Image (cartoon, rainbow, N blue to C red):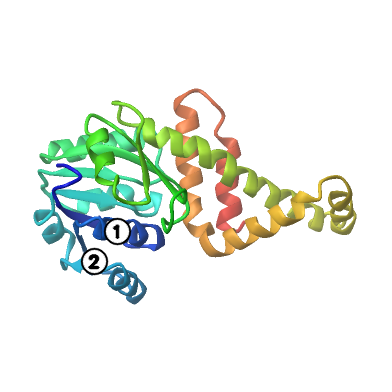
Amino acid sequence: MSTTAPITIGLLHPGEMGAAIGAQLVRAGHRVLWSSDGRSAASAERAARARLEDAGDAITLAAASDMVLSVAPPAAAAAVAESIGEFGGRFVDANAIAPETSRAIAESIHARGGRYVDGGIIGLPPDSEGDTRLYLSGPDAAEIAALFAPTVVDARAVGGRIGDASAVKLAYAGWTKGSAALLLAVREYAARAGVEDVVLAEWAQSRPELGGQWQRAERSRERKGWRWVGEMEEIARAMVAVDLPDGFHRAAAEIYRGR
């Protein structure tokens, strides 16, 4: 596998981030497949804009692919990996999952004849340089990173251990999305306690940046909160694994769940 030899890549599933990454790989000269089986019309529209080819179902996609890239909600990561069946190529899991979850998926992929690369995405869907970092770890991480050299995706191999890339992603999201959930929670507390106006006036005087941060957090919760529930739960699992309290992020999951 090299940056000059086009390969066939199966992409599961083309959400906003996945479709944008798929489009970058197509522009780099690779053939990128997707699976329309069970997917929405919105997914089909994104795939068409990204110039992805429909392989029909996940089994057919994997059979035709040198590499499969999974970009899915965290709670679906294991099911996506299972959906491809027997697979002898490289499987790159770029989902926001705990290192322990990643290693469990790796065992499943290896048992079915494939090779596994752990991944974590930070940033916006790629459109220009600097938008997106793709962290990769595992024995094949550097080789996968080289595939992205002609694209605007900044792919970085961070070590040979499966789970390291996921740990980078969760440490980053644990603060950015975890602190956003805390901000949402404390403003809701102020409202329920009947002192929201006073608190907002205090913020305006002493912490004026919090107003804009709250607005961004609320917009994100409305658009993507359902997806972040699983991510907070994966962060909680990762915290427990290194003997840290998991309550912060279990509570954040409840905030994004809308409770």
In the rendering, at what x and y percent does residue 71 appear? 33, 53
Q: Earlier in the sequence, mark 1 or mark 2?
A: 1
Residue drawn at (22%, 37%), measured in percent from left and top?
A: 143
Toward the top, the furthest residue is: 243
Q: Nearer the viewer, residue 100 or 153?
A: 153
What is the secondary structure assignment of the residue under circle 1?
Answer: helix
For residue 127, which quarter of the picture? bottom left
Q: Secondary structure at mark 2?
A: loop
Between residue 41 and residue 257, name the one nearer to us.
Answer: 41
Q: Is residue 139 above or below residue 66?
A: above
Q: Can you give x and y, in whole percent of width and height, for residue 114 in the image?
A: 14, 40
Q: Which residue is mark 1?
A: 22
Q: Residue at x 27, y 60 (%)?
A: 27
Q: Would residue 26 appear left or right of 171 to someone viewing this image?
A: left
| Quarter the N terminus occupies | top left
* Residue at image point 45% right, 33% down: 238
Q: Are marks 1 and 2 in contact (CB under 8 Å)?
A: yes
The one of 144 and 226 positioned closer to us in this rendering: 144
Residue 202 visible to the viewer: yes
- Mark number, residue 52: 2
